[in-house]
Image (cartoon, grey):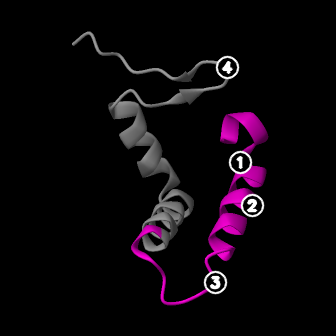
Amino acid sequence: MVELVGEEEARKIIKEKNSRFVEEPYSNLAKTFLWYFERVLEDTEEVGRVLARHDLIITPNKGIVIDTME
């Protein structure tokens, strides 16, 4: 998302998505998305390292490129 819209806009979009989960008790799915978005915002570099380690970096106009020839 950062490559498509820039880091500031990407963070704004994620924060906006999180703000939509306003009703408690949260469903398990909502809790999962909240946790995921919070990790992306708080642990951005670590999330990037994990994605890179598993060849899951998303490239604009190419999508996710997964090397299955191991």
The residue furthest bottom is: 24
SS for callout 2: helix
Answer with mark 2 or mark 3, whichever residue precedes in sequence: 2
- Identify residue type, mark 1: Glu
| Residue 61, numbered circle | 4
- Identify residue type, mark 2: Lys
Q: Nearer the viewer, residue 14 or 30?
A: 30
**Number of numbered labels in the structure image:** 4
Select label 1 or label 4 by which is in front.
Answer: 4
Which residue is labeled 2 in the image? 12
| Residue plotted at (62% across, 70% down) | 18
Alpha carbon distance from label 2 to label 3 = 17 Å
Image location of residue 48, percent across then percent down = 47, 42
SS for callout 1: helix
Alpha carbon distance from label 1 to label 4 = 18 Å
Q: Quadrant of the C terminus?
A: top left
Q: Nearer the viewer, residue 18 or 40?
A: 18
Evaluate if marks 1 and 2 touch, with contact meaning CB atoms under 8 Å apart: no
The residue furthest left is: 70
Which residue is labeled 3 in the image? 22
Q: Is residue 10 left or right of residue 46?
A: right
Answer with mark 3 or mark 1, whichever residue precedes in sequence: 1
| Residue 7, numbered circle | 1
Answer with mark 1 or mark 2, whichever residue precedes in sequence: 1
- Identify residue type, mark 3: Val
Q: Is residue 36 left or right of residue 68?
A: right
SS for callout 3: loop
Q: Which residues are magenta?
A: 1-29
Picture layout, residue 50 above or below residue 27: above
